[in-house]
Amino acid sequence: MSLPLITLSGVPIVLHAGAPDQADTPLLGETVLRLSGGEAVKMTHWGKASGTISAQGWMPPGLDGLDYSQPLELRLTSQECIVGEGRVFALTSTPRPDVNPWAFALVGAQWEPTTCIFSGAQAEAAIVIGATRYMVQWMPAYRVFASKPPKTQSSGQSSFGWTITWEEI
């Protein structure tokens, strides 16, 4: 099985453009308020994702022709993960349409792979005898705004560097 590639608006980022480093940062409309007795209450109004993808490779990533004024589809390979005692999980982001979520069961001190049934925004791990916890993982896909990536070129090292910064719509 070949691993999927990061894609931005259908353009795959191939290994020749560099092995990508992915970082994500939650964008949260939240604040902590203090009540009259000093107790803290966290208020969250919304939550979105943002992040960067960067690499140094033998060729540029080929993203110059994209229309950055419009929303773009970003398919990542970094994994989202939820662990719990139950087997049914509400996924916190949309999985890539080309890679289904997968599941594990914690038996003793080992995570054992198990069947995962995915429907809508929910994933269910199959029962495993002796399991105390279950885990579901998936690779997310987002509709994002991004800017044309800044690039570098090193003639001395025959390499190209680039960074994409993105925010979920």
Image: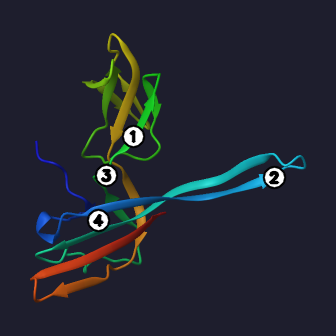
Of badges 2 and 3, the one in the foreground is 2
How far apart marks 1 and 2 lie (CA) works out to 32 Å
Name the residue carrying label 2: 34
How far apart marks 2 and 3 lie (CA) works out to 36 Å
Element at label 1: strand
The three-letter code of the residue at mark 4 reads: Leu
Give the residue at x 77% y 48%.
Answer: 40
The three-letter code of the residue at mark 1 reads: Cys
Mark closest to the chain's N terminus, 4 or 3: 4
Which labelled disc corresponds to residue 8?
4
Number of other residues with Cα within 10 Å of mark 4, as a class: few under 14, some 14 to 19, many 20 or more: many
The three-letter code of the residue at mark 2 reads: Arg
Mark closest to the chain's N terminus, 4 or 1: 4
Of badges 4 and 2, the one in the foreground is 2
Q: Quadrant of residue 117?
A: top left
Q: Nearer the viewer, residue 50 or 21?
A: 21
Of badges 1 and 2, the one in the foreground is 2
Q: Nearer the viewer, residue 109 or 14?
A: 109
How far apart marks 4 and 3 lie (CA) works out to 14 Å
- Place of residue 20 in the rendered image (x, y in percent of width and height, measured from the top left): 24, 64
Name the residue carrying label 1: 81
- Left or right: 154 in relation to 74: left
Mark closest to the chain's N terminus, 2 or 3: 2
Which labelled disc corresponds to residue 78?
3
Q: Residue furthest top?
A: 129
- Place of residue 24 in the rendered image (x, y in percent of width and height, measured from the top left): 41, 59
Q: Residue furthest right?
A: 36
